[in-house]
Image: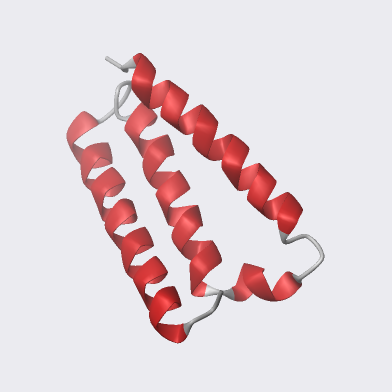
Amino acid sequence: MVNISEILDLAISIFLFVYLIFLIKKNKEYIKSFWFYGFLFILLSKLNSVIEGFVFPNEINLMEHSSFLIGCILLFISILKKEL
């Protein structure tokens, strides 16, 4: 079963990701950065959170938490490299 909070979280994350792409549209360097891919993996984590309510809950749950971990590691690397 999917919680309404997971759906709202996914919708807000998609909105913020689209806004982020709109902001960096002029500067293509950010798309090749750890920072961008970190946010992309966190968005993927939110998507997996909703999908796990429909099919393969254990496997998708592992993918959800793995993608969130990878996203956090990429954001940490971005901070260390001072990409922003």
Name the quadrant containing residue 45.
Answer: top left
Residue 75 location (% of width, % of height): 40, 67
Q: Please tell me which residue is depicted at 33% across the width and 54% down the height of the picture.
A: 67
Report the label total. Answer: 0
Query: Measured along the vertical axis of the image, is residue 48 above or below residue 8?
Result: below
Residue 1 location (% of width, % of height): 27, 14
Residue 42 location (% of width, % of height): 41, 50
Q: Please tell me which residue is depicted at 30% across the width and 26% down the height of the picture.
A: 55
Looking at the rendered image, the quarter that the C terminus falls into is bottom right
Residue 7 location (% of width, % of height): 43, 22
Name the quadrant containing residue 50.
Answer: top left
In this view, the residue in front, 65 or 12, is 12
In this view, the residue in front, 79 or 55, is 79
Name the quadrant containing residue 51.
Answer: top left
Q: Residue furthest right?
A: 26
The colour scheme is secondary structure
In this view, the residue in front, 2 or 19, is 19
Q: Please tell me which residue is depicted at 43% across the width and 55% down the height of the picture.
A: 41
Q: Residue furthest left?
A: 58
Query: Measured along the vertical axis of the image, is residue 35 above or below residue 53?
Result: below
Query: Measured along the vertical axis of the image, is residue 71 above or below residue 18?
Result: below
